[in-house]
Amino acid sequence: MSDHRAIAVGLFNRVWELMEKTDRTPAETDEMIHGAHASRYHWGIVGTPENWERGEWQVSRVYAVLGRAEPCRKHAERCLEICMEHGIGSWDLAFAFEALARAASVAGDFDEAKAFAEKAYEASKAIEDEEDLEHFHEAMETIRGIR
C-alpha cells in the first residue's frame, strides 16, 4: 500500500510542475492529463476522502489549464460531492467552489463563475491558517471574469 501512496504523491507533484510550465510539449500535456488521473486513482486505493477530493480538484485544474470546460466541470462537481458526502469543509470546500468557478469561467459562463466564487469566498472564512488563506486568494485572482 505504501507504493500506491508514493506513486500518488509523486504524480501529484509532477502534474503541478507540468501545469506551471509555459512551454509544455504535446507529450508533456499528455503526461499531465494521465498523471492527474493516475494520481487520483492511487489516492482512491490508499487515501482519505480529503485525498480523493484534492485529486479530483487537480484533475479539474488540469482541464482548466487546457481550456477543456466539460471535463473541468465534471471533476469540479465530483470534488464538491466528496466534500459534501464526507463533511469536509474549510480549505477543501473553498477550493471545491473555486474549481466550480474556474470551470464556469472556462466555459464562458461568467455569471455562474461569479456565483460559485461567492460560495468559495464564503467557505474560505473557515480557513484559519493565514498562508492557506493567502494561497486561496491568489488562486481566485487567476479566475477570469469573476471581478
Image: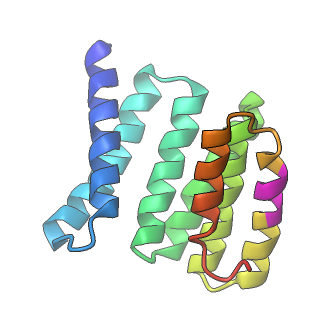
Q: Residue at x 68, y 67 (%)?
A: 101
Q: Position of residue 2 (x, y in %)?
A: 30, 14
Front-most of residues 141 and 118: 141
Give the quarter of the image for residue 23. Answer: bottom left
Q: Position of residue 35 (x, y in %)?
A: 28, 48
- Direction front: furthest residue: 130
Q: Which residues are magenta?
A: 118-122
Q: Residue at x 33, y 32 (%)?
A: 8
Q: Specify whether residue 121 is painted magenta.
A: yes
Give the quarter of the image for residue 107. Answer: bottom right
Q: Specify whether residue 98 is painted magenta.
A: no
Q: Residue at x 52, y 31 (%)?
A: 51
User: Magenta region, mostly helix, strand or loop?
Assistant: helix
Front-most of residues 59 and 122: 122
Q: Position of residue 97 (x, y in %)?
A: 71, 56
The vertical placement of 54 against 88, above or below, is below
Q: Quadrant of the C terminus?
A: bottom right
Number of disc labels: 0
Q: Residue at x 53, y 41 (%)?
A: 54
- Direction top: furthest residue: 1
Residue 78 at least partly seen: no
Q: Position of residue 130 (x, y in %)?
A: 67, 40
